[in-house]
Image (spheres, rainbow, N blue to C red):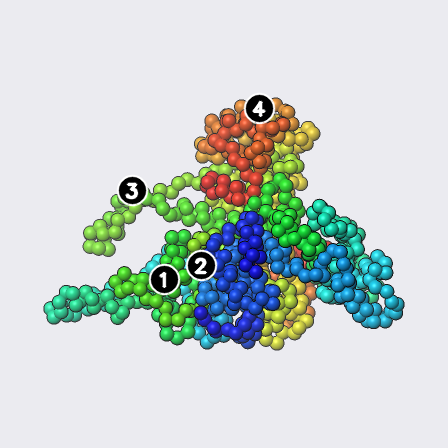
Amino acid sequence: MGNRFDSVQAVRDGLKKVNYLADEGIASVAFLADRLGKPVLVEGPAGTGKTQLAKSIADLIGARLIRLQCYEGLDESKALYEWNYKKQLLRIQADKNSDSWSEVHDDIFSEEFLLTRPLLEAIRADDPVVLLIDEVDRVEVETEALLLEILSEYQVSIPEMGTITAKQIPLVFLTSNNTRELSEALKRRCLYLHVDYPDMDREKEIVLAKVDGITEHLADQIARIVRSIRQLDLKKAPSVSETIDWARTLMLLGIEHIDAEQAKETLHILLKYQTDIAKAAKELSSDK
Amino acid sequence: MLDLMSGFVAELRNAGLPVSLTENLDAMEAIKQIPLEDREAFKWALGATLVKNAAHWRAFETVFEVYFSLRGPEYALKDDEDAGDFWREMQDQMRQGEGKGGAGAMDSLTQEELMSLLMRALMDGDQAMMRALAKQAVQRFAGMEPGRPVGGTYYLYRTLRNLDLDNMMSKIDQAKADDGQMPQTDLERRLENDEMQHRIEQFKQEIEAEIRRRLVADRGAEAMAKTLRKPLPEDVEFMHASRDEMQNLKKALYPLTRKLAARLARKRRHGRKGPLDFRNTVRHSLNYGGVPAEPKFKYPRPAKPELMVVADISGSVAAFARFTLMLVYAIQGQFSKVRSFVFIDGLDEVTDYFKVTEDITEAIHRVNTEADVVWVDGHSDYGHAFEVFWERYGKDVGPKTTVLLLGDARNNYHAAQSWVVREMKHRARHVYWLNPEPRSYWNTGDSIVGEYGSHTDGVYECRNLRQLEAFVEKLA
């Protein structure tokens, strides 16, 4: 299949270059996805860099990112392809008398009248592409079936035109926030990657990489505090993106060293529920 | 390799993971692409192809460890030479580092010296040292003998008892104070504590892994995997869950409620056809010049049920009641009203605890500490509790109400008063009984679930999250 990457380590180093700090698991699965030509299903809590992974991979191999945002009610005409009815109508009216019916019929179901949607576009692309199917858990179970053909065979069947097969096998990433169990059929076709909150050291590195001019000391402190907060029993634990936001805020405020007061005042950037904030503030000020 | 792989996959299936044939083939294909000496990548390759659910990851890791990482001569129980070498090296380095002279291998170390080494390693976060110490600790304290039919937990207990890790925290604190490195502010102290606890936890895992390694070397992978097999989080029984399992259950509960709420909301909105809505159709026909081109339908909106939860919170079934309450309140948007009552031999309404706070855990905590549920002796008395319920709140039970009774119906041979349940059934829409005991235990000893059950719409066995989830979905 594909040979975009030489080794797992190469993926890891490459991702680091585009400012995405992957752990061993992420790099291994991305490497395998390329070698086996299989889509990757990325699952995990919100804000842990699932979507960013696809973007960074696209960045790394210099491919175009095609994104399909899923939502409830997504259907074929939004995901795969649609016939351009207006144009077809115009075509029929434009030369009412000249052509025979069969000619018109063949004509209006040709590529010219086909509106490609993300999935078909990814299949037909000549240039390298990365296909990102975002938040796939939002579509209904029945709609999932739409994806199955493209995920296993890399082809799309259009009744009027026949089957369109991919010119090259694109890298495909599906993300899910796990609001519902995905169907077995879909899972079976994918490699599975669970992205969790990073451990302290990696989080520190992420903060260092993403926030310009931050000191090692502050980054270390941020990572430690965030880890402590995640251990609490919260409605929504702070995500990596919120950690980065918090680090940026602290930088803007010109804080070099966090004390309990400052942490409490800026907690609302990390946590989005009032009860969570109250709990964390209480925990941070009292030592165990 | 093929043999090993098929054994591995079989064991995964035994542990309850659904591994299909295609996934198995994918795994074979995947490991061809990965250099075998890269253990991490190898593990991830198997994980990505065989495990498709994050909750199953732990089970996978255990099986993986047993099958693939515990090989090698240094783990044999009988000769300690190889293991000793590494240790001795570490030892020498330590000695040189600290400038202490003296010959002698690890065995000559006293327990105090060992402990202080451990403390140093923990304070410095020295991973290699911690690993070596874990090895040494197991060797010295676990007292493992080849072929002895004892589980790993026993050895773990013996090792930990000798190491006395609980006191390690305070000792480290003390040492820090002596060194004059005590952190200044409360926040820093707290962070420091978290860090230390994290490291101690790591050390414990190190010991566990070491014990497993030795056991595998002794007994072989298949036998070992069998003893290590643990139920998946959704299959853990409420009544027998250990503290760790409880933690995992709690973690599993939250995403589950979100899933359940989303599913119920969807169920309510979709897939129901109703009769033609004439008014709406005519109104939309104006768009098409009076032609009713777009028919509109009336979608029935089924009334949301009103829920009354009456839960036994005495000793053995408390955990089950807690989980059910948490689950019910997490999806309370799906019910028009939720009221909750708890009892042991007296009964108290606890609805208000959940109203004043958004935090379910805190509410549960208040239920456990503040609710007035003891009447005489604090042993379950279903009969009296039901009587009180009927007397005080019976008038609130109406045709829209669904009543959930939670408990094992072990009545300590008190009067059953099952007429209350009969009356309830009469007046309420549904009455269900949820029992956390296995079905085979029902109606044995002082359990009279059958007597109560005959008056309800159904008695359900709810031993684990999976069964509870299935019931709640049916309910809403």
Mark 3: which amino acid?
A: Pro
Secondary element at image label 4: loop
Mark 2 or 1, which is nearer the eye? 2
Mark 3 or 1, which is nearer the eye? 1
Secondary element at image label 2: helix
**Which residue is at the front of the view, B421 or B40?**
B40
Considering only vertical position in the picture, is B155 above or below A156? above
**Separation (CA) of disc 2 from disc 1:** 19 Å
Mark 1 or 4, which is nearer the eye? 1
Determine the chain carrying the residue at label 4.
B
Quadrant (top left/top right/bottom left/bottom right) for the N terminus of chain B: bottom right
Res. B364 image quadrant? top right
Considering only vertical position in the picture, is B10 above or below B104? above
Mark 1: which amino acid?
A: Ala
Residue hosting label 2:
A189
Q: Are marks 3 and 2 in contact (CB under 8 Å)?
A: no
Same subunit: marks 2 and 1: yes
**Separation (CA) of disc 4 from disc 3:** 46 Å
Residue hosting label 4:
B417
Residue hosting label 1:
A79
Q: Is residue B252 left or right of residue B275?
A: right
Mark 4: which amino acid?
A: Gln
